[in-house]
Amino acid sequence: MIRSRRQSLAKSLGLALALAFWCEYLVYPVVLFQCGYPSADPDPKASAPIRTLILADTHLLGSRNGHWFDKLRREWQMHRAFTTAYAWFRPELVIFLGDLFDEGKWCAPDEFEYYVRRFQELFPMDPKQTLAAVVAGNHDIGFHYSVTPYLNNRFERAFEMSSVDRFSLKGVHFVSVNSMAMEGDDCFLCSKARDELTKISGQLQCLARGNDCDIDYDFDDKTPQYSRPVLLQHFPLFRESDAACNEEDAAPASEKYKRFREKWDCLSRNASQTLLDVLNPRLVLSGHTHHGCRVKHERDIWEWSVSSFSWRNRNNPTFLLGTFSKHETLLAKCFLPTESFVINCYLGGAVLIVVHFVYSNYRITR
């Protein structure tokens, strides 16, 4: 009888381990393998499109906010989701749309260094195969009123970026913009960003005219040609609210109709218009709201707001897969396993394991 009880206990423990393995590992490939890159029409004369993975608002917790288990649970979720997606989809470009950290604007130098190391551990990439592009969010360096040169510079140094950047791959131009630099005043951040935007606009216009342009060649783009750029930023362009957003990961009804505050929930009207006029982007990618949205601006310019990648901010996190070529821009939205599904798996599995254990012991004692 003792041997039978031990066998019953061992079997129950084995089932518990299998349940944990499913919830912590297998659920990610099962869900993510249902997603894929949007396919473009084959063009034998064109280079292969850029395979791109886009995510936003990871909000890695620091020492102030959140319980240690909350931190562990959500960071593990993002790590498993990212490493699974990275291994399966093999992106050439990964874009992080700001708010990498939750407490970057507050943390001391040693904690910030830990933050950066933790980010690299949670989102590992092969630099020989993948380019990582990062834009700053308000939680990384603070809102405009609280950004200091120190906070801004340490973030830029950590991720080798600046307030306004341009890089090009396979004939596709990307322009990243620090949303906090779009305030429109003469702060140290804004004046520099304005100069860089003017410079980049001039370079793109020169390419559009087909002239021999003075452009810093970068990466594999040794003979750049004009194509409308992709704009990357943390804040969305100006919109009244999320009322017109009907995505599956859109804001809940309690938030959807709240009026956006300019320079807080979105860029100002003036800054948004400036970016549209100066860059004439083919696509705008943004984050910040933690909810998904697609909105069309003037000149048929589409903006995709990407919802948060973390369970801490939403039950159904998402990311985008994109294929970008000189003439085509295709995006697909991918959903991660929902937190409620994983919790229900644990609860349902635990009940079944307990029932199995009790029933097994009942049969032994009969």
Image (cartoon, rainbow, N blue to C red):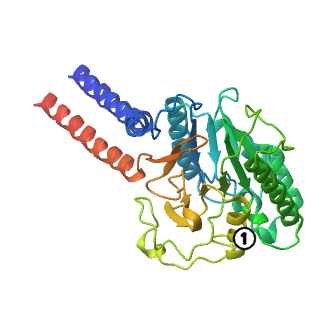
Residue 147 occupies which quadrant of the picture? bottom right
Left or right of 146, for residue 14: left
**Residue at figure coordinates x 68%, y 37% from the top left:** 169
**Residue at figure coordinates x 79%, y 64% from the top left:** 181
**Residue at figure coordinates x 73%, y 68% from the top left:** 274
Residue assigned mark 1: 271
Q: Is residue 141 above or below residue 218?
A: below
Q: Give SS at disc 1.
A: helix
From this viewpoint, which residue is outermost toward the bottom?
259
Relative depth, front residue between 366 and 52 = 52
Left or right of 210, for residue 329: left
**Percent coordinates x, y for residue 110 in the rendering:** 82, 47
**Percent coordinates x, y for residue 137 in the rendering:** 70, 58
Left or right of 319, for residue 136: right
- The amino acid beneath tag 1 is Ala
Report the number of discs.
1
The answer to whether residue 99 shows anywhere in this view is no
Relative depth, front residue between 281 and 292 = 281
**Percent coordinates x, y for residue 250 in the rendering:** 45, 63
Residue 253 occupies which quadrant of the picture? bottom left
User: Which corner quadrant holds the N terminus?
Assistant: top left
**Percent coordinates x, y for residue 85 in the rendering:** 51, 36
